[in-house]
Image (tube, grey):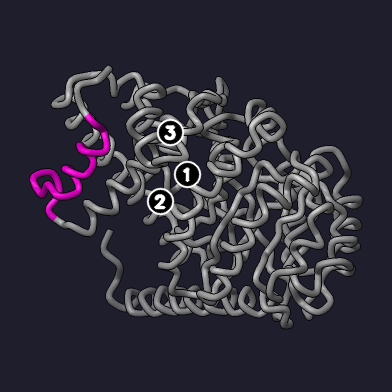
């Protein structure tokens, strides 16, 4: 069992400008990440 | 090298004219697509390119090298159109981001030993006991419960997982830019128009069938857990309706690759698949665009359902069904994409392939609502006889104007 909730990390990254300054791009990338996580 | 002053202006002018002609060519092709998909008469039958990784083999290159080198990727995927005639394409390049999956420690998508084609081995991790969790909160189940089962690299500390996800998103961004640049190259250098936009129509049933329970277990659930399966389809559906609200242009079209219908049969299709699917088709039509659906396997049993949809709201890619019969039954409402099957292009003579193409075009083209393509994506160079394929694309383009 992991000590984190993955959706919390993703939501945090959607708000966190330290890794990507553009909010629209961050939102688009976290959405693409979620899509990738369910597509294998 | 510096050009002589007297020559340079002529070369620049020629380049500008060429560029202008490419723009005009692109616009004319888009105009024809809009006409034929609205059951109006285009200037000629649009010829579709159905290449995925075929051109990697054609150019003698390897997929791993292309993922690592954007320039090589764009050159390999686009320069094939110097030899292959096409007005438009379904998709260009590869959609699977292998480097991102590798970062996550996942090998369900992999490159074949030939170094050219991509494969997928189904490895679904949802059990029948998981249905209540999926129904209660699809996002929580698919991301928090299922993803760590699938991706070994997610079983790490919070800090490391966060760093990993940033790395994966940077790879997603890099790969997305490669594909945008490739699309742009096809437009500006070759004037070839895309058929599919970035929007996708995803069936909630196919999400369960392809990614959650898998082919075998979903078909078992149809019989043993129909209520849970139906509830799961309904719980997932809003996630796939909502993105369709963002459609703001009639073209390019919304692509769909439904996998389950050909295995379901009429009764189960009507019960589990069609209600959410038809709602999505109607939503896309309301937004002024069209659903471009691969009729994988046979869709003959579902022609009555397709006929319930608004006229010219669907573009269907015919695979195993008889195109002429499809034209007679649904051709007045559904734009059909059909042509010579890849298997025939591999083994039959050029003359036989040309004769078959003529017959198909003569039967399918009246009234518009038709485009010409191979029945399946071309993945490996040997999926067809390359010489026959290249000559056929050119032949179809020149065969008949309206």
**Which mark is in front, 1 or 3?**
3
**Which mark is in front, 1 or 2?**
1
> In which quadrant will I find the C terminus of chain B?
bottom right
Residue B117 higher or lower than B376, as above or below: above
Label 2 element class:
helix
Quadrant in the rendering for residue A8: top left
Give the residue at mark 1: B95
Residue A20 covered by magenta stretch: yes
Could you tell me how far apart the alpha carbons at marks 1 and 3 are, in whole angstroms? 30 Å
User: Residue B62 location in percent, x, y?
Assistant: 48, 31
**Which mark is in front, 3 or 2?**
3
Name the chain under label 1.
B
Whether residues under marks 3 and 2 lie with C-beta atoms below 8 angstroms apart, the answer is: no
Q: Which class describes the residues within 10 Å of circle 1: few (<14), some (14-19), or many (20+)?
A: few
Give the residue at mark 3: B133
Q: Which class describes the residues within 10 Å of circle 3: few (<14), some (14-19), or many (20+)?
A: some
Q: Is residue B9 left or right of residue B124?
A: left
Name the chain under label 2.
B
Name the chain under label 3.
B
Q: Would you say residue B256 is visible in this rendering? A: yes
Q: Would you say residue B110 is visible in this rendering? A: no
Q: Are marks 1 and 3 on the same chain?
A: yes
Could you tell me how far apart the alpha carbons at marks 1 and 2 are, in whole angstroms? 8 Å
In the rendered structure, which segment of residues is drawn in magenta? A5-21
Decide which of tag 1 and tag 3 comes sooner along the chain: 1
User: Residue B150 location in percent, x, y?
Assistant: 41, 24
Residue lying at 61% horizontally and 49% vertically, measured from the top left: B257
User: Residue B316 location in percent, x, y?
Assistant: 70, 60
The answer to which of B154 and B169 lies nearer the viewer is B154
Residue B243 higher or lower than B43, as above or below: above
Decide which of tag 1 and tag 2 comes sooner along the chain: 1
Give the residue at mark 2: B179
């Amino acid at each position: 069992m992991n000590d984190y909730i993955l959706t919390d990390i993703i939501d945090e990254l959607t708000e966190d400008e330290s890794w990507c300054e553009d909010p629209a791009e961050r939102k688009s990338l976290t959405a693409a990440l979620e899509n990738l996580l369910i597509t294998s | 090298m510096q050009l002589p002053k007297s020559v340079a202006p002529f070369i620049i002018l020629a380049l500008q004219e060429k560029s202008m002609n490419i723009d005009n060519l692109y616009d004319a092709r888009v105009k024809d697509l809009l006409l034929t998909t609205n059951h109006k008469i285009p200037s000629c039958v649009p010829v579709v390119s159905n290449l995925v990784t075929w051109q990697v083999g054609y150019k003698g290159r390897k997929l791993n090298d292309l993922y690592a080198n954007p320039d090589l990727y764009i050159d390999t995927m686009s320069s094939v159109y110097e030899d292959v005639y096409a007005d438009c394409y379904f998709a260009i390049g590869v959609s699977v981001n292998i480097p991102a999956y590798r970062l996550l420690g996942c090998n369900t998508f992999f490159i074949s030993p030939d170094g050219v084609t991509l494969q997928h081995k189904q490895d679904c991790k949802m059990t029948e006991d998981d249905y209540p969790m999926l129904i209660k909160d699809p996002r929580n189940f698919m991301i928090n419960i299922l993803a760590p089962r699938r991706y070994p690299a997610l079983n790490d500390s919070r800090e490391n997982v966060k760093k990993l996800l940033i790395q994966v998103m940077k790879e997603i961004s890099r790969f997305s830019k490669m594909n945008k640049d490739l699309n742009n190259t096809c437009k500006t250098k070759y004037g070839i128009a895309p058929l599919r936009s970035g929007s996708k129509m995803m069936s909630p049933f196919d999400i369960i069938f392809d990614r959650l329970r898998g082919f075998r277990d979903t078909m078992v659930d149809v019989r043993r857990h129909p209520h849970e399966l139906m509830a799961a389809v309904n719980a997932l559906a809003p996630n796939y309706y909502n993105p369709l609200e963002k459609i703001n242009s009639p073209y390019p079209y919304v692509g769909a690759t439904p996998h389950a219908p050909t295995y379901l049969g009429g009764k189960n299709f009507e019960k589990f698949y069609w209600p959410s699917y038809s709602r999505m088709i109607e939503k896309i039509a309301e937004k002024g665009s069209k659903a471009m659906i691969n009729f994988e396997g046979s869709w003959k049993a579902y022609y009555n359902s397709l006929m319930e949809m608004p006229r010219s709201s669907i573009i269907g890619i015919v695979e195993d069904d008889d195109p002429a019969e499809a034209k007679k039954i649904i051709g007045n409402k559904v734009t059909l994409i059909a042509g010579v099957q890849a298997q025939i292009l591999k083994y039959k003579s050029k003359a036989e392939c040309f004769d078959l193409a003529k017959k198909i075009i003569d039967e399918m083209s009246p009234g518009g609502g038709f485009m010409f393509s191979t029945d399946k994506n071309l993945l490996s160079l040997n999926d067809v006889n390359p010489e026959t394929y290249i000559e056929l694309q050119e032949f179809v383009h020149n065969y008949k104007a309206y």
